[in-house]
Image (cartoon, helix red, strand yellow):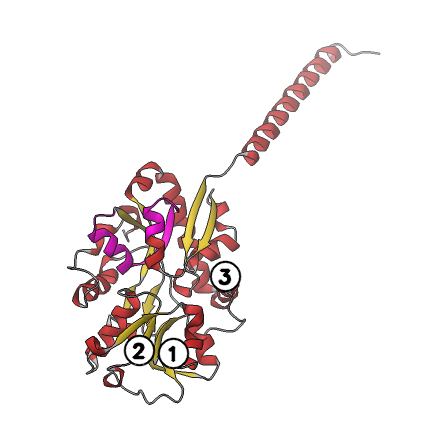
Amino acid sequence: MSVPGDHATTRATRTQFLVAGAAAAAAAATAGALGAQTLPKVRAVGIPIDVSGAVYYATDLGIFKKYGLDVEVDSMGSGASVAPAVAGGAADVGSANFISLAQGHERGVPFLMIAPSGEYTSKSPTTQLLVAKDSPIKTAKDLSGKVVGVVALNNIAQITVSAWVDKNGGDYKAVKFTEVPFAQMAAALAGGRVDAVEIAEPFLSGALNSGDARSLAADGDAIGSTWVEGGYFCTVTYAKNNPDILKNFAGAIAEAGRWANAHPDAATAIMLKYSKGQPQRLRYHIVFPERFKPSDAQPLIDAAAKYGALKAAFPSVDMMAPEALVQ
């Protein structure tokens, strides 16, 4: 027996069910569409050394995707080769040291720093000047007339070595510099092709752990006890056209840096995969700041001007995006 109102209730319930079903279907369709959306693609260029590690950590850990970016990372040997790739449009974002970028800035290339890479600290010097274990070289003066291998001429390594020699009683003008890729430095030193090398992690630990090399100096100390080595950059045009991408890229790099600071051994494992180094525990770990402080970048630019890599010093803030600075 039917009860008055049952048909109305049934119709109402059926209508609610259909509406709810339609809403659920619409939500599922929307979610599917969002999932199928192609994330903005960013072509990035890194250097597979500790100081530039954040871009590799963000890739491996899925942090870039978390920030809505599809980042494709290629590797190059030095900041001197990365800068032309970004300037010429072969890459959207690159990682390079301040001297490489300052040289471009000096020539009128409109580079803009959007996030810092690693920070040199005398407490954990991830770049050092090495000599062979049995080398007679003991002091800065002993480098006169000797050949020092650096990853790029007239760039950050040559400047830090020159500054260290100069500040420790040697003649930096009497030092001969030659280019040697990081991966070949230990062999070049062991084979006597160079008298010293300025080498960075993870290759630094590999050379020291081999027992064939010893540290002559933490030459970066000649610049200062703490200073930012470089960062991630793009052209001004790319920055103007892609503000959201740059904001998200910088956020991902900051998060990757925080993770690496808290998990140095796990970060090492990722870095060794890209640098093709042997599994090992690094002796030194870089520190990753989240944003730039111009005062931490200025010493390197000043040294570059003093030792001939730049014609003149200029305020480091001139190359930094406002969003990249410590507020």
- Circle 3 packing at 10 Å, graded few (<14), some (14-19), many (20+), is some
Give left or right: position of 266 versus 311.
right
In the displayed structure, 249 sits above or below 14; it is below
Question: In the rendered structure, which disc, 3 or 1, sits on the residue that comes first in sequence?
Answer: 1
On residue 147, the disc is 2
Image x and y of residue 258, in percent: 42, 59
Is residue 235 visible in this depiction of the protein?
yes
Query: Which residue occupies the extreme top position in the image?
Result: 4
Q: CA distance from mark 1 to mark 2?
A: 8 Å
Q: Secondary structure at mark 2?
A: strand
In the figure, residue 82 lies in which quadrant? bottom left
Q: CA distance from mark 3 to mark 1?
A: 26 Å
In the figure, residue 204 lies in which quadrant? bottom left
Query: Which residue occupies the extreme left position in the image?
Result: 312
Pointer 1 residue? 193
Q: Secondary structure at mark 1?
A: loop
Taking the spot 25% from the left edge, 48% from the top edge, the residue there is: 109
- The span shown in magenta is 84-109
Q: Quadrant of the N terminus?
A: top right
Question: In the rendered structure, which disc, 1 or 2, sits on the residue that comes first in sequence?
Answer: 2
The label nearer to you, 2 versus 3, is: 2
Q: Amino acid at mark 1?
A: Arg
Q: Between 101 and 54, which is closer to the camera in this rendering? A: 101
- Circle 1 packing at 10 Å, graded few (<14), some (14-19), many (20+), is few
Q: Between 203 and 260, which is closer to the camera in this rendering? A: 203
Taking the spot 56% from the left edge, 29% from the top edge, the residue there is: 30
Discs 1, 2 touching: Cβ within 8 Å: yes
Q: Amino acid at mark 3?
A: Tyr
Pointer 3 residue? 274
